[in-house]
Image (tube, rainbow, N blue to C red):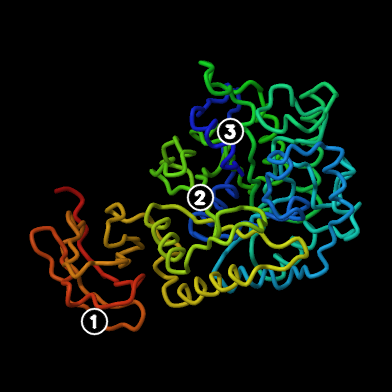
Amino acid sequence: MISKFFLSVFIFVFATQSTFSQDYTPSAVNMEARKWFADARFGLFIHWGAFSIPGSGEWVMNDRKITAQNYAQLQRFFNPTAFDVTEWVALAKRAGMKYITLVTRHHDGFSLWDTKYSDFNVMNSPYDKDIVKMFADECQKQNIKLFLYYSLLDWSRDDYPHETGRTGQHSGRTGKGDYASYLQFMKGQLTELLTNYGQIGGIWFDGHWDQTAPEGESDRSSRLDWKYDEIYSLIHDLQPQCLIGNNHHLTPLPGEDFQMFERDLPGENESGLSFQNASDHLPIEACQTISESWGFNLNDTTYKTAQQLIQYLTKSAALGSNLLLNIGPRPNGEIQPEFKERLAALGSWLQINGESIYGTSAGYLPPQPWGCLTQKDNKIYVHLFNNNGKDILLDMFPYKKITKAYSLKDGTAVTVTLRDGTAIIPANSNQYEPSHVIVLETSDLILYR
């Protein structure tokens, strides 16, 4: 992911990738996978690898200006004896998550699987186990889909075009970048990931922004033709259902199957990373952290509350987006108790209120100060954050009738009045804890006003 260090430079760049001649028509199984993904609404992001060892986040190699030669020593220390893949996957399941996106290879180049294309991998560490295979097998057992994060850039390889890269400039590489060679390397690794580990839900690319022009230059296009037509075609040929997303912070490119937003909800740009408009035809995913860091960071003890996370999930669904919520486990394979507690709270809330999240569409109104809306069939779900003692007014209500109104938690009837096209939930009917959900069952859709 993009570090705070890089953010000040990145905000000036929302580059466009050079166009390529890919005539991509999604297959029937791909369209079915997109529908499943859009309905799933909630996934677990896992940032974990050799970068976890120093305890300074996943950008430690770049931030501390560590050379590739020195950084490679971390491979000798990666031995997560407390790692329990069964418990990690079960944790996601109990939290109500439908898929897991695992970082398989971050910008440092360390691969978490048995790859023949790089010696810098988990099989040459003391742990000596294929972690991707462990996840693939366990996700299949527990019926949860596995997505794979894969970095497009590499701070360790000589053939990555590091001369034009905006990061990793202190790695001590002396070889000349050769994108043709590097492209073949990536194709080889992606082929391994998509042939040796069963059905993969999707590939989550990151790193495009490394080849965009720096601050002060007028050219905002990528300095590198990534050959996405070749990369994306390879993936869809190997696994047609496999969804492709790219964290380039641009309008989706041909061949991509979902769009992501980093640290932002669609339509927001609080992080300074999300200049793009939300797609009107692709599934959307927002990724966010429980703490402030993606990878394990000893100095990061700032955790979002369970209530904040529940409301973030709710607001994400209200905007028609999934939420991919990140954890950065410890290098020994332990998941911090703060992460476990918050995931458990999300799971408990979803056990009661999951109907208002899974398989829903965006609310007909955008999120409001009091909360937000999701919709499914003839039901509108009113998610209450804080009404401040005031009536909740749902203007331009799209139905002529409200046939039933009740609390999703216990079925208690709620008094709702429909007057002049506005549904009114009175303040005295809203004495609920935050993140309470009221269901409005409706009839007679108003198509035009």
**Which of the two discs, 3 and 2, sits closer to the camera?**
2
Circle 3 residue: 24
Asked which secondary structure carries label 1, the reply is loop
Tell me if 327 is positioned left or right of 377 in this view.
right
Asked if residue 379 can be seen in this view, the reply is: no
- Tell me what residue is drawn at x 44 percent, y 42 percent: 281
The kind of residue tagged 3 is Tyr
- Residue 53 percent across, percent down from the top left: 77, 55
Question: Is 198 or 56 nearer to us in this picture?
Answer: 56
- Tell me what residue is drawn at x 82 percent, y 30 percent: 172
Circle 1 residue: 413
Asked if residue 25 can be seen in this view, the reply is: yes
Residue 285 badge = 2
**Which of the two discs, 1 and 3, sits closer to the camera?**
1
- Residue 177 percent across, percent down from the top left: 79, 23
Give the image quarter of residue 424: bottom left
The kind of residue tagged 2 is Glu
Question: In the rendered image of this protein, does residue 150 appear above or below residue 347?
Answer: above
Tell me if 156 is positioned left or right of 12 in this view.
right
Q: Distance from label 1 to label 2 (Cα)?
A: 34 Å
The kind of residue tagged 1 is Ala
Tell me if 171 is positioned left or right of 277 in this view.
right
